[in-house]
């Protein structure tokens, strides 16, 4: 007769065998799994390395392209703005390096920059919109009529456009020197603009801005700059709104303009003014404005081509 002790020993042996089997199986599975993971890690590391090499190569090509554009830029724009005058308007987020490079290119093109008007952060701040509109109405010269639109950007453009640009019909100032000085002084005291010494009205304007606006009221800030530039364009022979990467987004001034077919029919936009090529295109687009044409240029998805006269993709 089999004793109870034998049963217990037998059952213990069975469980021990099962435990050993589980351990051996787990060890084999773990080794297989670890081996597979190691292989996947090696593959991923190789892919990351390849991607990094591709990025480095792409960065090198961009540097070469920028160097080439910077070298040939002065020749590409030579004579395009001969005997033309240009006023430069910059927003608070415009980059000084882009501004200075554009000034140099305008000179290379034979043009003359008559001065710079800086728009402060308050200019596009929705919290100061009513104050800006009140000042615009109060400072309006006798011979200047404001547009019917009531938004601050359009109203400010309706005031500043005739002050910054001469008439395209007779090439004469649209306001007296005293009226211009009074309006600019009032806007300066209100904290909305800063004018360079000796600013004079010009035939053409470049409105240079930064990238996409951010934070509360980002869309309103972008819209104010976009509508301002559009209204300035209506005041003279031509205007180009140029921004850097991000400016063509939904919260960028260039993007707001490009979403408005009425604005894009008259105002040219450039979305890559942070590059030498983009700045060259800005000058070429300004020349195109003189011929009554407008375009959407740059590298963003809502651009129609890279430069005036370039084939569409």
Image: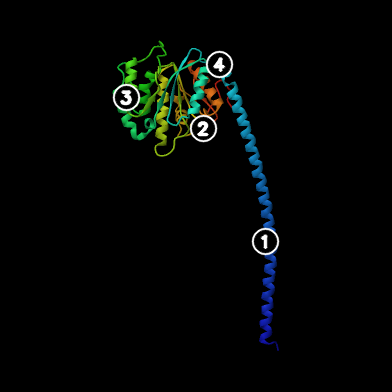
Q: In the image, residue 230 lies at what x, y percent?
A: 42, 24
- What is the spatial separation of the Cα atoms under label 2 and label 1, in whole angstroms? 49 Å
Q: Residues within 10 Å of mark 4 (few under 14, many from 20)?
A: some
Compare marks 2 and 1 and give the one earlier in the sequence.
Answer: 1
Look at mark 1 in the image and give the residue it sits on.
30
- Say how the picture is coloured: rainbow
Q: Residues within 10 Å of mark 2 (few under 14, many from 20)?
A: some
Asked whether the beta carbons under mark 1 and mark 3 sit within 8 Å of each other, the answer is: no
Q: Does dot 4 land on a helix, a strand or a loop?
A: loop
Asked whether the beta carbons under mark 3 and mark 4 sit within 8 Å of each other, the answer is: no
In the picture, measured across the screen, residue 302 lies left or right of residue 48, that is: left
In the picture, measured across the screen, residue 135 lies left or right of residue 19, that is: left
Look at mark 2 in the image and give the residue it sits on.
245
Asked whether the beta carbons under mark 4 and mark 1 sit within 8 Å of each other, the answer is: no
Q: Does dot 2 land on a helix, a strand or a loop?
A: loop
- Residue 124 seen from this side: yes
18 vs 209: above or below: below
């Amino acid at each position: 007769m089999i004793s109870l002790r034998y049963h217990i020993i037998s059952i213990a042996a069975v469980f021990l065998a099962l435990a050993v089997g589980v351990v051996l199986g787990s060890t084999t599975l773990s080794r297989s799994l670890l081996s597979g993971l190691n292989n996947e890690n090696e593959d991923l590391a190789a892919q990351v390395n390849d991607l990094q090499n591709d990025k480095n190569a792409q960065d090198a090509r961009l540097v070469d392209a920028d160097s080439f554009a910077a070298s040939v830029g002065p020749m590409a724009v030579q004579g395009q703005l001969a005997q033309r005058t240009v006023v430069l308007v910059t927003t608070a987020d415009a980059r000084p390096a882009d501004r200075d490079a554009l000034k140099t290119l305008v000179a290379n093109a034979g043009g003359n920059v008559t001065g710079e008007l800086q728009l402060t952060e308050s200019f596009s701040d929705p919290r100061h919109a009513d104050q800006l509109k009140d000042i615009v109405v109060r400072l309006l010269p006798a011979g200047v009529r404001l547009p019917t639109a009531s938004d601050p950007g359009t109203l400010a453009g309706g005031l500043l456009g005739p002050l910054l640009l001469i008439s395209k019909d007779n090439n004469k100032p649209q306001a007296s020197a005293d009226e211009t000085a009074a309006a600019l002084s009032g806007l300066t005291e209100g904290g909305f603009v800063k004018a360079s010494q000796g600013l004079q009205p010009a035939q053409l304007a470049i409105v240079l801005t930064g990238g996409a606006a951010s934070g509360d009221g980002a869309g309103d800030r972008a819209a104010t700059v976009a509508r301002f530039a559009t209204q300035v364009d209506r005041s003279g022979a031509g205007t180009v709104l140029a921004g850097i990467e991000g400016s063509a987004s939904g919260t960028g001034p260039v993007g707001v303009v490009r979403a408005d077919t009425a604005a894009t029919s008259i105002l040219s936009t450039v979305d890559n003014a942070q590059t030498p090529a983009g700045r060259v295109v800005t000058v070429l687009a300004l020349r195109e404005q003189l011929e009554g044409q407008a375009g959407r240029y740059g590298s963003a998805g809502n651009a129609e081509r890279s430069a005036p006269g370039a084939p569409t993709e």
